[in-house]
Structures are given as C-alpha cells and as structure tokens.
C-alpha cells in the first residue's frame, strides 16, 4: 500500500523530463536510462531503430493505459519509473516500444491516464500513416 510518505518520496525522486525530444535525443534517453527488452539492455543500434521509428520526434503526453495494452499486472515496487515510449501507427492505434509492463501495471491500478513519450509514423509519400514495424521491447 502506498502511503503519503511513500508518495512524497516517489515524487521527489522522479526525474524532470523534457516535454519533447528529437530522435537523436531519444536515442540518448534510451541509452542513458539503460532501457531493456527481454534480451537485456538496448544497444545503440536498437535505440536508434526505436527512436527513428517516429517521423515527428517525441512529445511527452498522456494516454489511457487501456489504449496501449489489455494486459493487467500487479505493480512491482519501483522507483523513478520513466514514461513508456509509444508509437502511434495510425490514429488511435498504438505500439508500445518500451514500457509494456508499466502500461499493464497502470491498467491494474485503473489509472485514467499515464504519461508517455509519443511519436508518430508518417508515410512521407502520401502523408498517411504507414505500418512500419520496429522490434518490440518488453520492459
């Protein structure tokens, strides 16, 4: 159970996050924070592949976790939880690149919205979204 004291501790330890990032800044964000997938810590090539999936850079926003995953997981005790990295494939269709467990935990807690870094995929030829698939991470 989270007490008021625990909540204050968590808030004080939460890092200040930029409101938006370029793809290059997202690569640094992934590497600096040691983000992982099921195989371990992401390397530079994997980080660049995820970051460059967005045609528009990345912005910090909020989304309902139920739009990101139907999974529900009991939360683990964690500090300094970073926002998931999410790619909007087409309007209302999202792919979680990093943070699926955090999204599932938010579903368990029935949170209305969570903060995410959101990028969008755009087809430069037609201006319509393209369904580009990038390696899925599972952190």
Image (cartoon, rainbow, N blue to C red):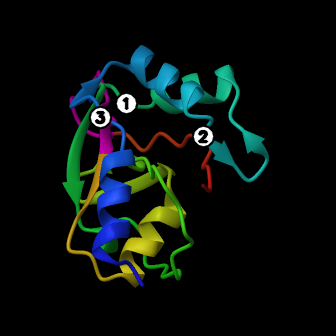
As for residue 121 lying within the magenta part, the answer is: yes
The stretch in magenta equals 117-129
Q: Which residue is mark 2?
A: 35
Q: Position of residue 21 (x, y in %)?
A: 31, 23
Q: CA distance from mark 1 to mark 2?
A: 18 Å
Q: Which residue is mark 1?
A: 54
Which label is found at residue 123? none
Dot in front, 1 or 2: 2
Element class at badge 3? loop
Q: How crowded is the residue under tag 2: few (<14 C-alpha within 10 Å), some, or many (20+)?
A: some
- Residue at 49%, 55% in the rendered image: 79
Label drawn at residue 16:
3
Secondary structure that dominates the magenta span: loop
Furthest-front residue in this view: 5
In the rendered image of this protein, does residue 110 appear above or below residue 47?
Answer: below
**How far apart in space, not on screen, are marks 3 and 1 (Cα)?**
22 Å
The answer to which image quadrant residue 59 occupies is top left
């Amino acid at each position: 159970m989270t007490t008021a004291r625990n909540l204050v501790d968590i808030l004080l330890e939460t890092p200040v996050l930029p409101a938006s990032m370029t793809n290059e800044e997202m690569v640094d964000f992934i590497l600096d924070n040691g983000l992982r997938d099921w195989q371990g810590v992401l390397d530079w090539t994997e980080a660049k592949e995820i970051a460059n999936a967005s045609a528009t850079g990345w912005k910090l926003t909020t989304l309902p976790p139920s739009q990101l995953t139907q999974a529900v997981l009991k939360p683990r005790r964690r500090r300094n939880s970073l926002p998931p990295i999410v790619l909007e494939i087409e309007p209302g269709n999202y792919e979680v690149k990093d943070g699926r467990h955090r999204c599932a935990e938010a579903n368990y807690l029935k949170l209305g919205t969570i903060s995410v870094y959101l990028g969008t995929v755009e087809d430069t030829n037609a201006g319509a979204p393209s369904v580009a698939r990038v390696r899925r991470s599972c952190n």
